[in-house]
Image: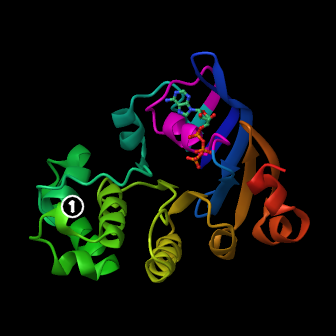
């Protein structure tokens, strides 16, 4: 479904991503793990079209999207939830959601159906549809940005650290929701620092360190064979 080969991403002279490759089959939940600065967010931004690759290829369901713009990537069926969790604070929950449906703006009936589906997945957002997004709690804002991404009707969803800075009970709910999304057939790439919870929901994982992939395998293999603390603490 998503195939990354020999990807290189530079910021000027800084080589943030140094020739990585990984893939996701349809319906898989794959995690990208690694310490701060490993290059995970850079990888996601490049797949999303927000950063230019200096080399390599990104293929989505057979279509080469390596040089695609962010809008073209969304139109190709890939939505990204960045770690910045930015909602439009003065717009209501509903207005924020409809902005996610921008590429389908002429398909009103389709958007209505999809909004109902998203409300069923996130009943809390349905209850708060008229509330200004800036007044939602941190966990609710995280749900809103995920729900907004779903309004583009993606086949692949990239999530950058959705649990960042949230209380443990909310983190639990976010992970439950990710599992629910997987059950709907969505293909998901999850970047996380929360290793144990991530490996509990992921099918497979890749571990990045200093711009390279240093380990990969099923969640069980990663748990049993990789010295996670060494990769996480940079040892
Ligand atoms: P984190 O979990 O802290 O977000 P990460 O694995 O996502 O870490 P990146 O944010 O992708 O890592 O950063 C990879 C490397 O690229 C780091 O060395 C970082 O300092 C560098 N980097 C990131 N953004 C920029 C930028 N805009 N300009 C220059 N260097 C950058």
Tell me the residue that label 1 is attached to.
110
Left or right? Give the position of 136 relative to 172. Answer: left
Residue positioned 49% across, 24% down in the render: 67
Residue 42 highlighted magenta (yes or no): yes
Residue positioned 49% across, 75% down in the render: 171
Q: Quadrant of residue 10?
A: top right
Left or right? Give the position of 128 relative to 180. Answer: left
Q: Residue 232, image x and y in percent?
A: 74, 56
Q: Residue 176, image x and y in percent?
A: 50, 80
Residue positioned 90% across, 65% down in the render: 225
Residue positioned 30% across, 71% down in the render: 140
Left or right? Give the position of 169 relative to 64. Answer: left
Left or right? Give the position of 196 relative to 74. Answer: right
| Residue placed furthest toward the top | 13
Q: Quadrant of ligand 1?
A: top right
Q: Which is nearer the eye, 196 or 176?
A: 196
Q: Quadrant of residue 43?
A: top right
Q: What residue range appears in magenta?
A: 37-57
Let me know if residue 52 appears in the view. yes
Label 1, residues with CA under 10 Å away: few <14, some 14-19, many ≥20:
some
Q: Residue 56, image x and y in percent?
A: 67, 26
Residue 87 in the image: above or below residue 172: above
């Amino acid at each position: 479904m998503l195939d990354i080969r020999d990807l290189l991403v530079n910021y000027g002279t800084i080589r943030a991503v140094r020739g990585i490759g990984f893939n996701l089959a349809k319906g898989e939940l794959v995690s990208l793990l690694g310490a701060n600065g490993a290059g995970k967010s850079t990888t996601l931004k490049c797949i999303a079209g927000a950063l230019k690759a200096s080399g390599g290829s990104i293929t989505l369901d057979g279509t080469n999207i390596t040089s695609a713009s962010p809008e073209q990537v969304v139109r190709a069926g890939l939505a990204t939830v960045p770690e910045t969790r930015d909602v439009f604070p003065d717009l209501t929950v509903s207005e924020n959601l409809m902005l996610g449906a921008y590429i389908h703006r002429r398909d009103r009936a389709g958007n209505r159906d999809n909004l109902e589906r998203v409300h069923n997945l996130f009943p809390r957002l349905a209850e708060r549809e008229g509330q200004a997004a800036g007044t939602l709690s941190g966990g609710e804002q995280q749900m809103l940005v995920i729900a907004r991404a779903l309004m583009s009707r993606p086949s692949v969803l990239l999530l950058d650290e959705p649990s960042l800075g949230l209380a443990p009970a909310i983190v639990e709910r976010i992970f439950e929701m990710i599992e629910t999304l997987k059950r709907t057939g969505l293909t998901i790439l999850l970047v996380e620092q929360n290793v144990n919870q991530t490996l509990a929901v992921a099918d497979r994982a890749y571990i990045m360190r200093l711009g390279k992939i240093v380990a990969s395998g099923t969640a069980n293999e990663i748990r049993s064979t990789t010295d996670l603390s060494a990769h996480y603490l940079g040892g």
